Image: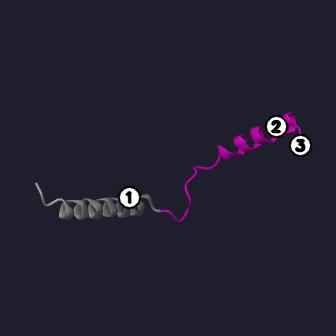
Amino acid sequence: MSFPSAAAQLVTLAAEGGEHSGNHQSLNPYLVGGLVLLALLTLLWITTRFNRDR
């Protein structure tokens, strides 16, 4: 594969990629955000349990 043909294919792929939002249909952003917040709060709670010297 030569460089010009590879570049042309990448340009075509990039042009088609603009039509999609990039998000998967089954991912709910509120659910993902809530789970991440819960995980971070759990890690914060664990950290404060081990830091008893303050």
Q: Residue drawn at (71%, 45%), measured in percent from left and top? A: 16
Q: Residue 33 carries which label?
A: 1
Crowd class of label 1 (few under 14; some 14 to 19; many from 20; radius 10 Å): few
Q: Which mark is residue 1?
A: 3
Taking 35 as reference, is 21 left or right? right
First to last magenta residue range: 1-27
Q: Confirm whether the magenta stretch covers residue 13.
A: yes
Residue with the mark numbered 2:
8
Number of residue marks? 3
Name the N-terminal-most of marks 2 and 1.
Answer: 2
Q: Which colour scheme is used?
A: one colour
Q: Residue drawn at (38%, 58%), measured in percent from left and top? A: 33
Residue 30 position in % (x across, y down): 39, 60
Q: Residue 44 carries which label?
A: none
Name the N-terminal-most of marks 3 and 2.
Answer: 3
Q: Residue drawn at (31%, 59%), measured in percent from left and top? A: 40
3 vs 2, front mark: 3
Q: Quadrant of the N terminus?
A: top right
Secondary structure, mark 3, is loop
